[in-house]
């Protein structure tokens, strides 16, 4: 504690010194300004005294002779005076910037006194369960009990307990604890709510090192909670408030809106007129609730009301601004409102303003950083970075909002963390990245840093099996929606 007190006293001396130095500088500036005021005042008083003395001692003829130079002198003095010069030079006050509430909170929580040999802040936890878990499935954590010297504590710990707390603070799950051997304890728990949860591990009623742990709870992927059928080659997918699904039916050349109770409404027919489609693939919902469609075969973008009324058509076939070559997906950036269109055959991402006017584009054909080979989908993380499913380079590229390359992950293959024709990507509020692999018939899951988490699915027609998964969406609750293209259905995982 002594060294902390010394640090605070040193900081006090430093801050007082800064305040005194600032005060001296301000006083010096004010003194200079005051000298200027006094000089101007002396000149005005001298002029006033001269006029009064002339009135008292001079004749009218003499005063008239002196009128011109006298008036000139008065005008020069009054003309040189500006009222704004009376304002203080700079601010006279000083502000002490601080965050006392946070400092007080830190001080209140600083340090602990333990009565016992086991030291909670030396103990260590490991295992998948301190980072990620699956809703409804048991997950394990291993705790190593250590004493204050960091050595194994071989006696039984009097109290070791854990609790998983959901983000709403209401849902709480108690874990079970078993002693495996002399200083190793196994904890298991079964999470119930998807999203970010806090895992609290207490030893002798004190938080252990790094507790609470932030645990991302994923949906249960062993079986879908719902399947939406009666679709024809569903591709791009978006989810509205209340669980309403908007999906592009590629082979039916239409957009379908499916309510939470399964009611389905569709709009669009095959054609090139307003409101018609030729193999629509991409779907997005903008901040006004408008439906944006990447009309793949017509090489254009169409905008519709929330009920499907045609509002606007943008684009023609080509490679220039506001021209498209096989647009396959469309995404609205949540921070800027700008619209990102992945153009498969132009090997680029074209960026439109929220009113669908041209903004910029980035990318070209290739395999170097920032180049693409059939980019198929775009998503954004909660920091605003842009992720591109670079399908035939078998990777995910991460770029800034302006398209500047940051990093990438994935390579061609079938092993964990490898990708085979990734054509869809979605990122949830916990920054979990879901990638739909057209070639591997599965969904792979990564962190935003590209760390592989897990994958699920295989080729087939059963639950949690896929035939070329081609569209992904995640709602605010963390529910995952998968367009199972070849099986003509949407599988929903919660």
Image: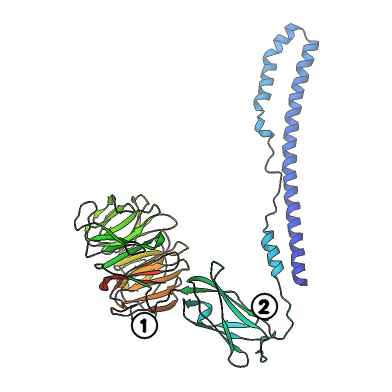
Q: Residue furthest bottom?
A: 181
**Residue 252 falls left or right of residue 129:** left
Q: Residue furthest left?
A: 271
- Residue 115 place in picture, x, y as percent: 74, 82
Q: Is residue 162 above or below residue 328?
A: below
Location of residue 266 by image quarter: bottom left
The nearer-to-camera label among 2 and 1 is: 2
Location of residue 66 by image quarter: top right
Q: Is residue 190 above or below residue 298?
A: below
Q: Residues within 10 Å of mark 1 (few under 14, many from 20)?
A: few
How many numbered discs? Answer: 2
Quadrant assignment for the C terminus:
bottom left
- Residue 388 place in picture, x, y as percent: 36, 66
Q: Residues within 10 Å of mark 2 (few under 14, many from 20)?
A: some
**Residue 472 falls left or right of residue 114:** left
Q: Nearer the viewer, residue 270 or 178?
A: 178
Quadrant assignment for the N terminus:
bottom right
Residue visible at 70% across and 10% down in the picture = 65
Mark 2 falls on what kind of element?
A: strand
Numbered tag placed on residue 415 in the rendering: 1
Q: Is residue 362 above or below residue 274?
A: below
Q: Is residue 293 visible?
A: yes
The earlier-in-sequence mark between 2 and 1 is: 2
- Residue 45 place in picture, x, y as percent: 76, 24
Location of residue 296 by image quarter: bottom left
Q: Nearer the viewer, residue 124 or 398?
A: 124
Residue visible at 62% across and 81% down in the picture = 161
Mark 1 falls on what kind of element?
A: loop
Numbered tag placed on residue 206 in the rendering: 2
Q: Nearer the viewer, residue 125 or 473?
A: 473
Q: Is residue 346 visible?
A: no
Distance from the alpha carbon under mark 2 to that under mark 1: 42 Å
């Amino acid at each position: 504690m002594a060294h902390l007190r010394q640090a605070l006293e040193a900081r006090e001396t430093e801050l007082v010194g800064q305040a005194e130095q600032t005060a001296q500088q301000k006083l010096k500036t004010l003194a200079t300004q005051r000298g200027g005021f006094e000089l101007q005042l002396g000149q005005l008083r001298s002029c006033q005294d001269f006029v009064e003395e002339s009135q008292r001692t001079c004749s009218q003829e003499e005063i008239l002779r002196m009128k011109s130079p006298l008036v000139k002198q008065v005008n020069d003095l009054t003309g040189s005076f500006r009222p704004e010069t009376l304002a203080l030079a700079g601010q006279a006050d000083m502000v002490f910037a601080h965050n006392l509430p946070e400092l007080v909170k830190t001080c209140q929580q600083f340090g602990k006194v333990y009565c016992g040999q086991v030291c909670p802040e030396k103990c260590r936890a490991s295992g998948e369960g301190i980072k990620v878990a699956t809703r409804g499935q048991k997950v394990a954590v291993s705790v190593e009990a250590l004493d204050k010297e960091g050595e194994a504590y071989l006696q039984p710990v009097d109290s070791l307990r854990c609790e998983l707390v959901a983000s709403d603070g209401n849902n709480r799950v108690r874990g079970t604890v078993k002693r495996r051997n002399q200083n190793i304890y196994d904890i298991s728990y079964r999470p119930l709510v998807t999203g970010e949860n806090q895992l609290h591990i207490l030893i002798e009623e004190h938080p252990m090192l790094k507790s609470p742990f932030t645990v991302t709870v994923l949906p249960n992927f062993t079986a879908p909670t719902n399947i939406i059928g009666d679709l024809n080659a569903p591709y791009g997918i978006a989810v509205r408030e209340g669980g309403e699904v908007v999906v592009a039916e590629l082979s039916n050349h239409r957009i379908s809106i499916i309510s939470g109770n399964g009611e389905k409404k569709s709009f669009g027919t095959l054609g090139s007129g307003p409101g018609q489609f030729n193999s629509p693939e991409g779907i997005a919902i903008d901040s006004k609730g408008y439906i944006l469609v990447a009309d793949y075969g017509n090489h254009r973008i169409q905008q519709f009301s929330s009920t499907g009324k045609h509002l606007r058509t943008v684009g023609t076939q080509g490679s220039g601004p506001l021209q498209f070559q096989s647009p396959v997906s469309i995404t609205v950036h949540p921070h800027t409102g700008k619209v990102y269109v992945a153009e498969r055959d132009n090997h680029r991402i074209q960026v439109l303003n929220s009113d669908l006017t041209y903004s910029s584009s980035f990318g070209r054909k290739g395999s170097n950083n920032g180049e693409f080979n059939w980019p198929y989908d775009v998503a954004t993380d909660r920091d605003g970075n842009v992720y591109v499913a670079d399908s035939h380079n078998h990777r995910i590229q991460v770029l800034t909002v302006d398209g500047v390359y940051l990093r990438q992950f994935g390579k061609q293959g079938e092993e964990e963390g490898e990708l085979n024709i990734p054509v869809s990507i979605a990122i949830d509020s916990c920054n979990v990245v879901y990638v739909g692999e057209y070639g591997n018939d599965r969904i792979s899951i990564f962190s935003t840093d590209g760390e592989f988490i897990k994958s699920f699915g295989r080729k087939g027609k059963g639950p949690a099996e896929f035939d070329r998964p081609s569209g992904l969406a995640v709602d605010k609750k963390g529910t995952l929606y998968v367009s199972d293209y070849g099986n003509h259905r949407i599988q929903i995982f919660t």
